[in-house]
Structures are given as C-alpha cells and as structure tokens.
Amino acid sequence: MAIDAEHLSKEYQYGFHDEDASVFRTEKGLSEDVIRAISARKKEPEWMLRFRLKAYRHFMARPMPSWGADLTGIDFDNIYYYVKPTDQQGRSWDEVPEQIKSTFDKLGIPEAERKFLAGVSAQYDSEVVYHNIKEGLEKQGVIFSDCDSGLREHEDLFRKYFSTIIPPNDNKFAALNSAVWSGGSFVYVPPGVHVDIPLQAYFRINSDNMGQFERTLIIADRGSYVHYIEGCTAPTYSADSLHSAVVELIALEDAHIRYTTIQNWSNNVYNLVTKRAVAQAGATIEWIDGNLGSKVTMKYPSIYLMGERAHGEVLSAAFAGSGQHQDAGAKCIHVAPNTTSNIVSRSISKGTGRTSYRGHIVVNEKADNVKCNVRCDALLLDETSRSDTYPYMDIKNPNVEIGHEASVSKVGEDQLFYLRSRGISEQDATALIVNGFFEPFVKELPMEYAVELNRLLAVQMDNAVG
Amino acid sequence: MTVRGLSIDNLHVRVGETDILHGVTLHVPEGEVHALMGPNGSGKSTLAYTIMGHPAYTVTKGSISLNGTPLVELSPEERARLGLFLSPQYPTAIPGVTVVNFLRAALRGLGKELPARAFLAKLSQTMASLHMDESFRGRYINDGFSGGEKKRTEILQMALLEPAFAVLDETDSGLDVDALRTVAEGVNRVRTPELGILLITHYNRILEHLKPDVIHLLYRGQIVATGGPEMAQEIEKSGYAPFIGTSAEPEPMGAHHGN
Ligand SMILES: Nc1ncnc2c1ncn2[C@@H]1O[C@H](COP(=O)(O)OP(=O)(O)O)[C@@H](O)[C@H]1O
Ligand SMILES: [Mg+2]
C-alpha cells in the first residue's frame, strides 16, 4: 500500500498529552510498601500479594541483562509504578469521563468500535477504564476483561493458568512486571468456540515517568479460535518511560490463538516485553508482531510446542530510526514429535537506527520429525544504519528438517532509479520500497491495521532523519 | 525556435573510472522512430540510462535536451515529468510493490492521476490488448517475472503513462515471435504523431513492425554510421563487420579511454 506524501507529518503523530486526571498514584520508585499499596488498592487476595512480593525479591536480586540492547538509561527510582486514572471503570461510553473520552477520540477508538469491534478494551494508564463486551461474546461464554477483573471475577480459572508459563523469576523484567502488574487483558475461550471478530485492546502510556506493566493472559480451550489485537501508542515526553509487559498464551488441544501487536511507542520508551505461548497437541499459535518507535525494544515472542502436530508461527516486522534499537526475534521450542514452526522476520534500519534478530530454535531429543523454517531479511536505508542476526540452534534430535535463510540488503540504487524514472519522487520511492519490504507482514493484518501501520511507517520514516 | 524531439550533442559519459561514450551526437525529431544498433558493449544501454538520468552515469561533456529543455541537471523524476520514458534492458524488481500500486504511484508522480474507475478500466483494457492476465495487476512488479512478462509490463507502463518520448532498450530481446508481435503492436497502439522513439535493438524483426525512419550504429562509444531502414537489413544479413571494420567483437572493458 502506497504512502501519500500528504500523510507525512513532521510531528510524532500521537504526541498529544492530556492533562493528567489521575486520582491515585504511588510514590516514585519501587519498594515493598509500594507493592503493598498497589495490592491493597486493588483489594487483591493474599496469594497475589505474596506472589508480587516474591517477584519483587527476584527483581532486586537479578542483575540487568548485559546482552542485547543498551539499558543503562533506565532509572528504576524515577518511575511511578502505579497510577489509577479514575475511580471507576466505565462500562458504557457515556460513563467515561469527558477528558479521557477526548483522548480516545484522538486515538479513534469509537470509530474502530463502530467498524468491527466486539469489545474495545482500552487501557488508560494502569487501569482499564473503558471496557465493552458485545453480548454475543458473553453468550458464547467468552471472557474478555481487563486482567484485574479477571482475577476478581474468575479467580479459580485465573489462578490455574496465571504465571504458569512465565514464572516471576524468568528474567528481570518479567519479575518487575510480576511485582507491579496492572491492567492488561484476560481472555478465556470455551471449548469449540470460534470468536469471529478480533478482540482488541488499546494501550497507552499517559503519565510522565510512568512505567506501564500490563499483564495479558489468554486461554483458548480445546478446539477454539481467537484473534487478539493489541495496539500501542504512547505520547512523547522528555523523560524516558518504561514499558514492561508480560503476555502468556495457552492453546489447549487443537486450539488456535493469533496474537497481533502493532506497537508504536514514542522514541523515549524502553519497551521490554516477555511474550510466551504454549501449544498443546494439534494447537496453533501465531505471533504477528510489529515494532515501530520506542528507544529500545527487546522482545522475543516464544512458542513451546508441547504436543504432537502443534504448530507455531512468528511473523515480525521492525523499524528502527535514528537513535532507536529494535532487538527482536523469536523462539520455538519443539518438545513433542511432528511439530512445526515458521519464523519470518523483516526489519528496516534508517539513519543511525539498529535492528537485531535474535532467534532460538530448540529441538528436544524426543521430538522426532520436526520441521522448522526461519527466514530473516533486513533492509538498510543508509550507510550509518545497522542490522545484526544472532540465530541460535539447539538441535538434539537428528531427524529434523531445518531451514534458515538470512539476508541484509540496502535500498538498491537501481530500484530507486526505476521508480524515479516513472516520475515518483525520491521520498515516495523510498516509502514504496519500504512498504513493499513489509508487505508479507502487512498482508496478515486486518485492513484498518494495515492502513494504520503504513501511516505510522510514513511518520517514522519522516521523523527518523539520519 | 525550439527543436522538438530528443537532441543529444557531443555527449561524453563516464561510469566509475571508465569513459564509455565519446562524443555521441543524435537527433530524434518528435514523431520519428530511430533505431540504435551496435555490438554488445558498445554503450547503447549507457546512452539510454544517461538520457533518463541514472545516478551511476556522469556526463563529462556535451548536452541532452528534450523539446528544447536541457536534461543533464535534472533528476530522473523531473525528466519523467517532461514526458521521457525508459524501458530498461533489465527492468528492476521491487518486491512487495504490486503492478497496480506502482502504476498508481507513477501516475500520481507525473500529475496524471485518473479517477479510480477510469484508471482500472484503462488498465484492464491495456492488459487485455497485451495478452496479460488480470492477475498481473496484483503481482509484485518484475518480481519473478519471465523476460517476456517484464517486457509486456514495460509496454503496459508506457501505454498508461503516455510519454512524449520513449527510449526502448532491447524491448524485443528474448521474445518469441508471438510475444514480439504483441509487444510491437502494443508500441504502435500508443504511438501518436508527436511520440518520438529511440529503439535499441539487435534485430530487424521488430523494425518490420515499427518502421524506423533512421538507423544509427553505435560502436565503442561513438556513432559510426547513420542510414535509412535498409541499413538494418544489411546488418541483419552481414553483421556489424562491414560497418565497423574487421571485427564485431566488443573491446574489453576499460581498454579505450577516449580523448
Ligand atoms: N554500471 C556500470 N559500471 C561499470 N561498467 C559499466 C556499467 N555500465 C556499463 N558499463 C560498461 O560500459 C560498456 C558499455 O556497456 P553497455 O552500455 O551496457 O553496452 P550495450 O548496451 O551496448 O551492450 C561495457 O564495457 C560495460 O561493461
Ligand atoms: Mg545494453
């Protein structure tokens, strides 16, 4: 899809900033008291408080990761770990406070809802304030709520799966999230239920210096299908913000979960996300992961293929402009025989931007007849841009079929010339090539998101002056 | 009084460290078809790229103008907007950019955007006349295309962009008899009394369809002979040797450095 020149705007498109209407926030920095305050505020059961405190100790004990991107700019003492914007959750649009509504208007959420939404779950700061589930979903027995409500209203189901695939001690940022998590989505799809419309959530950081630590848990019971879409847009601030989410997907036998992310944090956000899924026998997991914006992103969606015939897909696209580092990748762990996985990664670097692909394929001894295919392509727009590939393979069973292809290319002089010789300006020609490079990713998105992504890409292209 | 058509005067061109063209002078008045022939490595494609403004080719001396407007200082897109069109010998693939989006972007770039319905109708009609399947509009331009498909796509572009002057670099190469006829008919269909064409070719066959007014022979970066249509038949019969001396072999690259 082509980018219109008139859409190119010099400003960070979503860099508006509402007056902060927060009614409660914890003090800056993290301590046991802050965690107790969060948990008390949420009126959580005792086990969750203990879980948080244990996670906090893991977080304190673990060193910062020394591999991957540069994280030295993060100041943990200068972050608000919890901000609650309004006292009540609005159930209908009319109940949502005016000022917050105007923010949603700017983000176009009501439109999205009109178009094809079942439920819009929009996260304003740490709490979901507007949440609307279509009756049809409820009738099917589908649970789609913010994660806090999930804990409150479906405690047994929640507790059965919560943190079962990403334990608090998994990594420093998963530990941090486990200690202070708030908001995010909780989804349960009963056996055999096919959710026809994508479930969508908008996430947004609005408080200066505020970390956002949402937690998403999706369970697709036997033979069910669900597509969950997460879009993120943060406003621009001078101080660095931290976003550290945890997402757990559980696909039981023959279930299918597709999880789509279009993330567009402003250029000062550290985006450090742990995403992991398990696929039981015959189940399919698809991560569709688009990373634009942010200062640093570290994100490696992973899939544990636990049962026979389970299938995993990771399709990712990243764009790094000047000063940005997108350190992304994928992991597929083949535990059971006859499991398959497919990883496709496309990244673009511009100016001093940097992209890394970090992949990890594991095939266990008992996993006979595994098929796995990895393909990563990087495009460099300037002499100063950079891309690296770190593919790790740990193959313990000889009976596998593994393909790995990687390429790094520069925007070709001949491609630019060919387009320009048809009357297309150099800027538009570059945009066409860039869009074309992302096409395999874009064509997997619902129409609205494909358009949105191209628009965001145009803005990023324009902002990222080398 | 401006001279209508393409005028090239004493053109010297360098690629990297190598001088390729050594004073080419050529005038193709509007509405005429001139054929440019010559052994491989003579500099025909170099001339074509230079006319269109490819950044790898540097004009060290001389001038090019279209309908009186000097081209050398202009970008490729500016030349395109003056009505210049190049069908390159090896059209470039742009993965992910569909034929239809490419054409739309080109028309927009040229300021010739059509209403969607008119555009699609014209596209369908032109594709049908070039015996191209409708599915081609959704394919990524030149990506995995066969030689013949690429050439048809070039003529499709020419038909939709309606240039004032077209340089066709070996648009007939690698085509079977039927494909050649289709492509040649395609060119004839877009011809207007004003359209000038510089047709680079090795073969007489396309010339039977397009009926050139003048034949130029380029050898070692210079025009060594100019004549009427009969010259193409002589070349077809006896090769280039009678026109360029003993051998029709191209010189090794970089062996000749001009003046
Ligand atoms: N981009 C280039 N870089 C280096 N040498 C080139 C380039 N383009 C053409 N040449 C050289 O210029 C000479 C003429 O080539 P070309 O113009 O392609 O001839 P023709 O089209 O007549 O076969 C050849 O020696 C070729 O190797
Ligand atoms: Mg040539």
Image (cartoon, coloured by chain):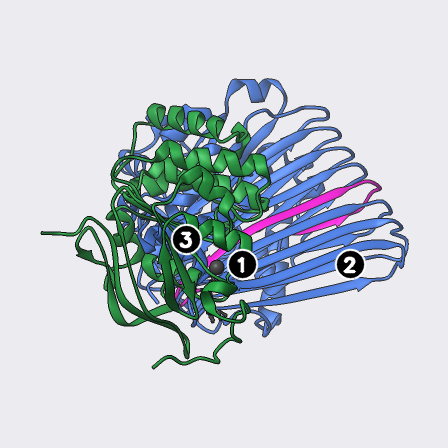
Residue B38 vs residue A250: left or right? left
Q: Residue at x 27, y 46 (%)?
A: B83
Amino acid carrying label 1: it is Gly
Whether the magenta-drawn stretch holds residue B163 is answered as no
Q: CA distance from mark 3 to mark 2?
A: 43 Å
Label 2 sits on residue: A362
Chain letter, colour green = B
Q: What secondary structure is found at the residue carrying circle 3?
A: helix
Label 1: which secondary element: loop
Residue A418: numbered disc: 3
Q: Secondary structure at mark 2?
A: strand
Residue A441 drawn at (x, y percent): 54, 45
Viewer can see residue A234 = no
Q: Amino acid at mark 3?
A: Tyr
Q: Quadrant of the C terminus of chain B?
A: bottom left
Q: Is residue A103 above or below residue A36?
A: above
> In the rendered structure, which segment of residues is drawn in magenta?
A302-324
Which mark is drawn over residue A203? none
Residue at point 49% right, 39% down? B152
